[in-house]
Amino acid sequence: MPYVNIKVTDEGVTPAQKRDLIAGVTDLLVKILNKDPATTFVVIDEVALDDWGIGGLQVPEYRRRAIDK
């Protein structure tokens, strides 16, 4: 019973993109690991930019600094 958790920033991931992610990940687990799609769970969490950190910085600050370089 695979469980896959995908985390993305909350920057406009569309319902169609989410549907494609869920189908694609499920298909990959079926193809590579012979998992049953009926017992394969895929969860997508959208995370606010202020709740996501890279290199010790929140994403907005990280991006600002990357632009300033």
Image (spheres, rainbow, N blue to C red):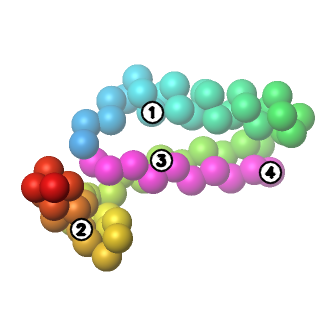
Say whether residue 40 is left or right of residue 43. Answer: right
Please, what secondary structure does the residue beneath circle 2 have? strand
Gap between marks 2 and 4, in whole Å? 34 Å
The circle on residue 58 is 2
Mark 3: amino acid: Ile
Cβ–Cβ under 8 Å for marks 1 and 3: yes
Q: CA distance from mark 3 to mark 2?
A: 20 Å
Marks 1 and 3, the one that precedes in the sequence: 1
Magenta-colored segment: predominant secondary structure? strand
What's the amino acid at mark 2?
A: Gln
Label 1 packing within 10 angstroms: few (<14), some (14-19), many (20+): some
Q: Residue at x 52, y 49 (%)?
A: 6
Residue occupied by mark 4: 1
Residue 59: give x, y in percent of width and height.
24, 60
**Magenta extent:** 1-10
Residue 21 included in the magenta stretch of the image:
no
- The residue wearing badge 3 is 44
Q: Observer-nearest residue: 23 or 69?
A: 69
Q: Looking at the picture, does residue 20 appear above or below residue 58?
A: above
Query: Does label 4 or label 1 sit earlier along the sequence?
Result: 4
41, 9: nearer the viewer: 9
The residue tagged 1 is: 18
